[in-house]
């Protein structure tokens, strides 16, 4: 019987998002492919350091203990531009860090994101901006990781995920109104259309998959009242009243939920992140992530008109 991915939360992660590859990448850029291959061979036994997405991936995979009988809720698959030989160091590092990741695609110098639909992936994370932009342009849910690795408490199994709304969970139609006509027209537009749900954005289905895992947690708590809920989802958006209502109604219409919502009305998101401490935060605007990426693993989702290259 084939291994079925349909009902699992499947994440694709590039080695550049999972590990710190700065040193190896510098060899490739400065010296070329053959010295890079020799470098990776020489350092095969050297475990790679943790990258921006490491904590998020580790905590996500830890949720598989909700299904201890070999039927994991979460599947993480490496999608890499390395060839199989240079990818050996990545797989050894995964083993060394104790991550239960066994599946990988290595494509020498080529973009692997084309295989996302075949693997039922609801998210692809990479530090290769070109790959991410191309994937999003094809309608695939992808994000570009920013910043460097963050300290991670190995004894803490909680997983906190934070999302922006427009251009991430929802499409950017309302954002386009704001960009073209300003804040007052935007608020008027959202008030008039409060009962009309947004079209989904690139990560709506990822949130839906996270919600399925949360339902398994609720079932576990029903069986074991001492079970501590680990997954916590927050909405952190520049919207405020009255534009908040359409966002809340859209989530309900899509059948997805968040635990908390921050309607900040232009307040710096970085200040909130320093207290919320999510293990990953998704936003469609680099300007917002400039303030968060110093303290929070941050992901740019280059979706919508605001992310189009200038003519």
Image (cartoon, helix red, strand yellow):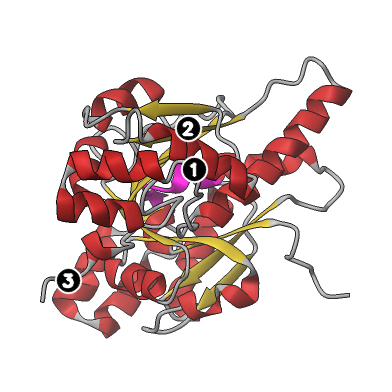
> For this rendering, which residue is in front, 73 or 266?
266
Q: Which residue is mark 1?
A: 56
For this orientation, the residue located farthest to the front is 192
Q: Are marks 3 and 2 in contact (CB under 8 Å)?
A: no
As helix, strand or loop, the secondary structure at mark 3 comes to loop
Q: In the image, what residue occupies the spot 42% across and 48% down?
A: 53
> For this rendering, which residue is in front, 154 or 291?
291
As helix, strand or loop, the secondary structure at mark 2 comes to strand
Q: In the image, what residue occupies the spot 26% across and 30% down?
A: 265
Q: In the image, what residue occupies the spot 88% across and 24% down?
A: 223
Q: Is residue 162 visible?
A: no
Relative side of 172 to 155, left or right: left
Q: Is residue 1 above or below residue 218?
A: below
Relative side of 95 to 153, left or right: right
Q: Is residue 246 above or below residue 208?
A: above
Mark 3 → mark 1, Cα distance in angstroms:
30 Å
Closer to the eye: label 3 or 1: 3
Q: Position of residue 263 (x, y in %)?
A: 36, 28
Q: Position of residue 149 (x, y in %)?
A: 33, 42
Q: Which residue is mark 2?
A: 234
The answer to whether residue 115 is magenta is: no
Closer to the eye: label 2 or 1: 2
Q: Residues within 10 Å of mark 2 (few under 14, many from 20)?
A: some
The answer to whether residue 48 is magenta is: yes
**Which mark identifies residue 309?**
3
Which circle's residue, 3 or 2, is located before the other in the chain? 2
For the N terminus, the image quarter is bottom right
> For this rendering, which residue is in front, 19 or 203?
203
């Amino acid at each position: 019987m084939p291994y079925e991915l349909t009902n699992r939360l499947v994440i694709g992660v590039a080695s550049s998002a999972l590990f710190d590859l700065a040193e190896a990448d510098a060899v490739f850029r400065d010296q070329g492919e053959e010295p890079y291959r020799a470098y990776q061979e020489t350092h095969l036994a050297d475990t790679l350091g943790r990258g921006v997405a490491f904590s998020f991936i580790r905590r996500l995979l830890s949720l598989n203990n909700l299904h201890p009988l070999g039927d994991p809720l979460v599947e993480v698959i490496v999608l890499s531009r390395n060839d199989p030989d240079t990818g050996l160091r990545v797989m050894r590092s995964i083993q060394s860090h104790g991550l239960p990741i066994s599946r990988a695609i290595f494509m020498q110098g080529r973009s692997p994101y084309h295989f996302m639909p075949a693997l039922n992936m609801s998210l692809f994370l990479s530090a290769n901006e070109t790959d991410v932009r191309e994937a999003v342009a094809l309608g695939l849910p992808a994000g570009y990781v920013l910043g460097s690795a963050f300290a991670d408490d190995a004894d803490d199994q909680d997983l906190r995920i934070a999302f922006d709304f427009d251009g991430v969970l929802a499409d950017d139609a309302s954002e386009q109104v704001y960009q073209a006509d300003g804040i007052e027209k935007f608020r008027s537009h959202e008030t008039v259309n409060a009962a009309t749900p947004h079209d989904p954005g690139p990560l709506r289905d990822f949130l839906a998959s996270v919600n399925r895992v949360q339902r398994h947690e609720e079932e576990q708590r029903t069986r074991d009242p001492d079970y501590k809920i680990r997954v916590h989802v927050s909405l952190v958006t520049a919207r405020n009243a009255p534009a908040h209502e359409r966002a809340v109604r859209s989530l309900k219409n899509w059948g997805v939920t968040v635990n908390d919502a921050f309607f900040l009305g232009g307040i710096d998101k970085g200040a909130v992140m320093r207290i919320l401490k999510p293990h990953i935060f998704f936003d469609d605007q680099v300007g917002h992530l400039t303030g968060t990426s110093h303290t929070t693993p941050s992901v740019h989702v280059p979706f919508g008109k605001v992310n189009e290259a200038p003519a």
